[in-house]
Amino acid sequence: MSTGLTGAVIVAAGSGTRLPGPVPKPLLRLGPTTILERTVQVFEQCPAVDRIVVVVGADQVVPLSGRLAGKVVAVVPGGTERRGSVASGLDALPEAKWVVVHDGVRPFVTPALIERVLGAAMRRGAATAGIPVVDTLKEVDQNLVLRTLDRAGLCAVQTPQAFAAALLREAHLRVPHTVPATDDAGLVEALGEPVAVVPGDPANFKITTEADLELARLRVADGAGMGLRVGTGCDLHRLVPDRALVLGGVRITHLRGLAGHSDGDVLTHAVMDALLGAAGERDIGHHFPPGDPAFRDADSIELAASVSGTLRAAGWAIVNVDAVVLAEAPRLAPHIEAMRVRLAGALGIGPDQIGIKATTAEGMGPIGRGEGMEAHAVALLRKVE
């Protein structure tokens, strides 16, 4: 991208007051590594970056110097505030023609975003990533709205930010410390120099609070195939005479029951399909073929227990199941608690992890005419290590 040397300053020396604890925020675990190491890895993978300097708290310089290698040419102590930390990083990159500055606690930056910002800086001298503001903004004083601000043209700025190294050094040297600037782009602006804005990435969020950390861990877990998975299921059967009505493993007194190769339990079948779908498995027709004599008049609750065993063997835990049954008659509300208990027992979870609702079709269609019953289910699974 450039004939001149490009250095990156990754700033991770902050105190993290909004996420307190004995471990500095950049060194908290995020999957198999730490927040900071994950961030550094992205810059390692970016072809446009030649050298990396990591700025950390003074007590972390020695331990991290032994863990960070590759393009990392220095691990240096930061200052009491961000500006001093970036200046320390700049001092460790005396030969750089271009400099990219990035928050060490934005671990979901991508090489493409780094190169996009750097390319704009090479054309304009300075650039930052930014996202247009979509929420309504209000000025507030003592919990009262003073006025609504015009969000047109407003942008939420992220890092990375990239600069001609000489320009950024000049900004750090010339702009008085009394000038309020929360980022390096603000220092360059204070010199009267233009700063280009390129499209940022909503996923490139800064881990600031406990909620941010939880979101980041969920994202990493999901990306590693160890996160949460959702599945849906649907089943419907005709009502026929001389057949017992079974729903959720509960036998219910009614003039007709549901036709089917097994016991016709549409609720349990929908739940099983939702669970299998969330795990990426094929449907119940594959696992329990309707033409197989072994499953003729089978108890669907026993089949559900088999599905639960399949999920456990594959490393999945059931978080919760939610289902709805559509039927004109009989009234199902008195039986719902018993259904929850039966299904929970088969799936090896608590009844509080199962939600069941019943509704009618208001006389519309085959269900509304009492010709059959239908069930829909949603299941949430969690990968367990």
Image (tube, rainbow, N blue to C red):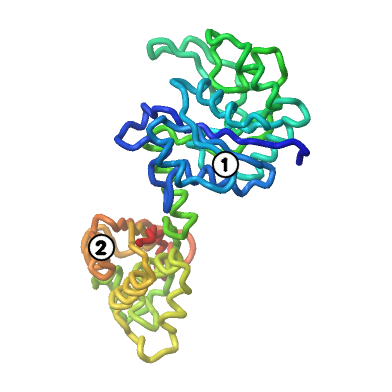
Q: Could you tell me which quadrant the N terminus lies in?
A: top right
Residue pictured at 28% horizontal, 56% vertical: 353
Q: Are there few (<14), some (14-19), or many (20+) residues within 10 Å of tag 2?
A: some
Between 264 and 43, the one lying in front of the other is 43
SS assignment at label 2: loop
What is the C-alpha distance between the residues marked 2 and 1?
38 Å
Between 106 and 263, the one lying in front of the other is 106
SS assignment at label 1: loop
Q: Are there few (<14), some (14-19), or many (20+) residues within 10 Å of tag 1?
A: many
Observer able to see residue 369? no
* Residue, disc 2: 349
Determine whether, in the image, residue 84 is placed left or right of residue 226. Answer: right
* x and y, in percent, of residue 40 in the image: 53, 43
What kind of residue is marked 1? Val
Residue pictured at 41% horizontal, 12% vertical: 144
Indicate the quadrant where residue 89 lies: top right
Q: Could you tell me which quadrant the C terminus lies in?
A: bottom left
* Residue, disc 1: 109
* x and y, in percent, of residue 217 in the image: 42, 47
Residue pictured at 56% horizontal, 36% vertical: 53
* x and y, in percent, of residue 288 in the image: 41, 82
What kind of residue is marked 2? Ile
